[in-house]
C-alpha cells in the first residue's frame, strides 16, 4: 500500500484538534475525512473505507472503544487511538477492541505524523517470498499472514502477527522492548514497554501459553525471545 494518498479517517469531537490533525495530514498528501462523533465515524468508515483511523477515546455518547469495535466488525483497519489517559486497563481494553497504537494528549503534530506513517508502512514490510516458519505444531506463514496451532487458525490482529513474525524469524535472539518497537512499530516512545508487553500477553493467550510459554519466552529485565 502506498502511504501517500492513503485514506485517513479522523474522529474527534474537539473541532480545533480535528482541524489541526486534518490540515497536517492533508498537507502530507493523505486523503482525510473528519467525523465528530461515533455514528458519523461508523458511517464514514463504511463509505470511505479508510486505510487508517485516528480515533479519540473520549467521544460523547458512544466512546472510542465502542466505535473502534464497531468499525472492526465490518472490516479490519488500523486504529491510532488518541487519549488523555493510558492506564494498563485502558490500554488492554483498547487493544481488545482493535486499536493498534496510542498517542497521549497533548501531542505534537509531528509525532502524530510519524506514527501515522509508521502504521501505514507496516503492511509493506511483509516478505511474501519467505516460506512458512514452523516450530512443533505452530506455523507462521508470512505470505498468507496466517498462523495455525495444531492445524487450527489463530486469530491474530495484523500487529500481533507482525510481533510474532519478528520474533519467529530470529529464534533464540533476545529482542528488547525498544528493538521490537523499532522493528514492528517503526519508532519508540516512553510507553513502548507497556505497549509491547500488552501485545505479547495477548499473543500468548491466543497461543494458549499464558503460564508455561512454549514459544515466546521472557528474558527478565531485557525483553522477549522466540524458542530456538
Image (tube, rainbow, N blue to C red):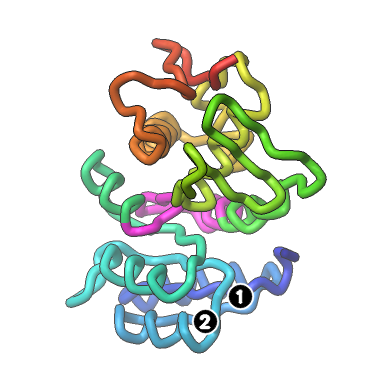
Q: Residues within 10 Å of mark 2 (few under 14, many from 20)?
A: some
- Give the farthest residue toward the right: 129
The structure residue drawn at horizontal position 42% and vertical position 29%, both measured from the top left corner, is 193
Q: Secondary structure at mark 1?
A: strand
For this view, does 135 lie left or right of residue 83?
right
Q: Nearer the viewer, residue 9 or 65?
A: 65
- Give the farthest residue toward the left: 61
Please say if 179 is above or below 117: above
Q: CA distance from mark 1 to mark 2?
A: 8 Å
Q: Secondary structure at mark 2?
A: strand
User: Can see residue 191?
Assistant: no
Residue 103 picture location, percent across and down: 41, 51
Q: Which residues are magenta?
A: 97-115
Count the marks: how many?
Answer: 2
For this view, does 75 lie left or right of residue 42?
right
Residue 217 lies in the magenta stretch: no
Q: Quadrant of the N terminus?
A: bottom right
Residue 140 picture location, percent across and down: 60, 39
Tag 1–tag 2 contact (CB < 8 Å): yes
Residue 100 lies in the magenta stretch: yes
The structure residue drawn at horizontal position 63% and vertical position 58%, both measured from the top left corner, is 120
Residue 182 picture location, percent across and down: 61, 34
Please say if 125 is above or below 37: above
The structure residue drawn at horizontal position 56% and vertical position 30%, both measured from the top left corner, is 180
Per the image, the residue denoted by label 2 is 33
Per the image, the residue denoted by label 1 is 7
The structure residue drawn at horizontal position 35% and vertical position 28%, both measured from the top left corner, is 209
Q: Earlier in the sequence, mark 1 or mark 2?
A: 1
For this view, does 36 lie left or right of residue 142?
left
Residue 181, picture quadrant: top right
Q: Quadrant of the C terminus?
A: top right
Residue 142, picture quadrant: top right
Amino acid at each position: 500500500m502506498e502511504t501517500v494518498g492513503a485514506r485517513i479517517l479522523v474522529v474527534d469531537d474537539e473541532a480545533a484538534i480535528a482541524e489541526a490533525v486534518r490540515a497536517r495530514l492533508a498537507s502530507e498528501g493523505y486523503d482525510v475525512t473528519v467525523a465528530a462523533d461515533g455514528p458519523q465515524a461508523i458511517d464514514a468508515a463504511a463509505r470511505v473505507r479508510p486505510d487508517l483511523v485516528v480515533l479519540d477515546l473520549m467521544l460523547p455518547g458512544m466512546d472510542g472503544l465502542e466505535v473502534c469495535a464497531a468499525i472492526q466488525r465490518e472490516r479490519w483497519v488500523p486504529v491510532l487511538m488518541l487519549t488523555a489517559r493510558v492506564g494498563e486497563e485502558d490500554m488492554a481494553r483498547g487493544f481488545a477492541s482493535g486499536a493498534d497504537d496510542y498517542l497521549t494528549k497533548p501531542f505534537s503534530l509531528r509525532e502524530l505524523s510519524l506514527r501515522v506513517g509508521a502504521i501505514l508502512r507496516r503492511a509493506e514490510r511483509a516478505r511474501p517470498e519467505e516460506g512458512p516458519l514452523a516450530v512443533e505444531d505452530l506455523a507462521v506463514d508470512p505470505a498468507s499472514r496466517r498462523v495455525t496451532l495444531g492445524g487450527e487458525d489463530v486469530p491474530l490482529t495484523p500487529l500481533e502477527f507482525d510481533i510474532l513474525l519478528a520474533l519467529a524469524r530470529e529464534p533464540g535472539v533476545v529482542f528488547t522492548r525498544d528493538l521490537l518497537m523499532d522493528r514492528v512499530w517503526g519508532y519508540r516512545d516512553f510507553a513502548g514497554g507497556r505497549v509491547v508487553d500488552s501485545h505479547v500477553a495477548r499473543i500468548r493467550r491466543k497461543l494458549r501459553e499464558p503460564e508455561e510459554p512454549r514459544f515466546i519466552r521472557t528474558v527478565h529485565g531485557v525483553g522477549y525471545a522466540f524458542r530456538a
